[in-house]
Amino acid sequence: MVLSLKGLEAGYGAKTVISGVSFTLEPGQILAFLGHNGAGKTTTLKAIIGMLRPSRGEVLFDGHRIDRLSVADRVALGLRLLPEGRGIFPDLSVAENIDVVAARNVTAGAMFGIPDVYKLFPVLEERRTTRAGSMSGGQQQMLALSLAILGTPRCLMLDEPSIGLAPNLVERMFQQVREVCKSHAMTAVLVEQNVAAAMKIADRVIIMNNGQIVFDGGPDEARASNFWHYF
Amino acid sequence: MLALQLLCNGIVTGCALGVVAVSFSFVYATTKIFHVAHAGVYTLGGYVAWSMLGHGFPTAVAVLTAIAAATALGALIQGLLYARLERRKATHLVVLIASLGTLAVIQNILAAVYTADILRFNLPWGAEVFRVAGNVRLTMTQLLTVVVSLVAYGGVMWFSNGTILGKQIRAVASNPFLAEITRLQPRRVHIYVMAIASALVCLPGILVPMDFGLQPYNGITPLLTATIAMIAGGVGSITGAFVLAIVITELQNMSLLFIPGEWSIGVTFFIFVIFMLFRPTGLFAAAR
């Protein structure tokens, strides 16, 4: 197992948003983490990455508890987050974006170095000197994905990566995520509103409602069941 | 002739204030803190240099000690005050008031130790006069101010765009949230920024009083001009802050030809209002 949550409870101030959230992910597994707005998906991601301290429960990474570690320490272990709509440094050039993140995260023998992300997204190499914030939404998301995987990612959490992208781009990007996961045994947690696209690449589906898990199973099982009932 | 002399003096003061503006802008763009206490760091640098020179230390030692003291003060303000306030999720207003308080404390300590009287640097080499063109004269201190300021500006440009730490600082300024989750250590970067900006502001903090003398409350007017230069130049633009500081100082100086000197602050704000009406994001905002 890579990532494991046990009875996680978290919220803001006195307000509990998620409770009793438990699941375990294996290497290379792709999880479609679904639910309507406010169901608690982003809160769960925040608790996993360390931006929110859980009030109860445990977060385990490779079998070790990480819920007391700082965000930076969790990222160093290989836990990564591609945040919703703000995954790049808009005022820096593409190359500068990649250079600063690589300088702090790529060590000898890392899974993804600078040449690897350029190989994965050749368009970024062509646009090296372009100000990142002035690129198209699709290119910005490619850069965001590159920044999220530089170094040795073991579990990548993507928070609504398809927002603002054309449908064909979404499909292409998701396929790329799947290829990267499968070739590098990297686990992915995909939070998405675009349910159809997410289900296409997922090995497992978890649906949240009102801060709790209401469905956990394979994508076929999800399709066969009264799927929309859970939202 | 008077016009030419005013023009040259404007360039000298403008360059010095340009460094104040660049350093202030550096802090604001990265930390979003309206670091008013920067005026106190500016003043402290001058006093430390004055004390060291008074005790017979060589100029280089005095300047380096002053820079070290300013750097340490800046890092302490960030580490002991701003960082703690940020951890407690203080609003911008609370941080601004804390900064104003810090400025008042620094000024009061300086006044208590050195009195509020004007202190003059006694540097024979600094008063050496050069004829620049015709009857326009500049002192050694003034020439040094221009050279040091230009080197400081060039140094910041190079540091910001050419070094990995400089890029890291710009990244933290550009997206603090992403900086946190990509391990760019925004909190540590903020301390670096404050230390660097404090070292920078120490340069005009020493050079300007060499011309005009030292007083505990000297830092306010330079900071005011620097703030306006930063906003009119476009927040985040180093060149914008530097160039606008020179432009504003020039306009202030040249206005002396037509109106009495006590109106020069009014002129500064008039320029500011005009800028904000026609270019609210700042002159160099697009060139970032």
Image (cartoon, coloured by chain):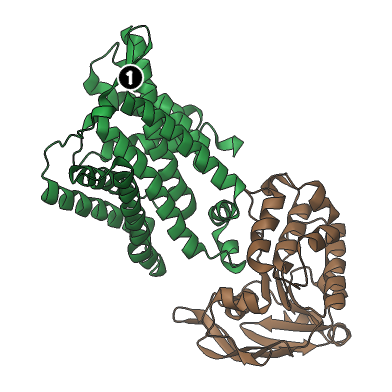
Chain colours: A brown, B green
Placement of the N terminus of chain B among the 4 image quadrants: top left
Left or right of B114 on screen, residue A154: right
Position of residue B276 measured from the top left corner of the image (x, y, whole percent): 45, 31
- The quarter of the picture where the C terminus of chain B appears is top right
Residue at the image position 62 percent from the left and 82 percent from the top = A210
Q: Nearer the viewer, residue B80 or A211?
A: B80
Where is residue A176, by image quadrant? bottom right
Q: Position of residue A70 (x, y in %)?
A: 53, 77
Q: Nearer the viewer, residue A124 or B162?
A: B162
Say which of B234 and A8 sits in front: B234
Q: Disc 1 sits on a residue from what chain?
A: B
In the displayed structure, B141 sits above or below A140; it is above
Q: Is residue B142 left or right of residue A143?
A: left
Whether residue A86 is visible to the viewer of this picture, yes or no, is no
Residue B245 figure quarter:
top left
Tell me if residue A223 can be seen.
Answer: yes
Look at the picture and state if B75 lies above or below A44.
Answer: above
Badge 1 crowding class, 10 Å Cα cut-off, few under 14, some 14 to 19, many 20 or more, is many
Image point (33%, 8%), residue name:
B135
Q: How many marks?
A: 1
> Dot 1: what SS?
strand
Q: Amino acid at mark 1?
A: Leu
Left or right: A184 as drawn, with respect to B1: right
Residue at point 30%, 48% (across, down): B66
Residue B23 lies, in percent from the top left, at: 42, 44
Q: Residue at x 37, y 18 (%)?
A: B8
Residue indicated by mark 1? B138
Spot occupied by residue A114 in the image (x, y as percentages of width and height) = 76, 60
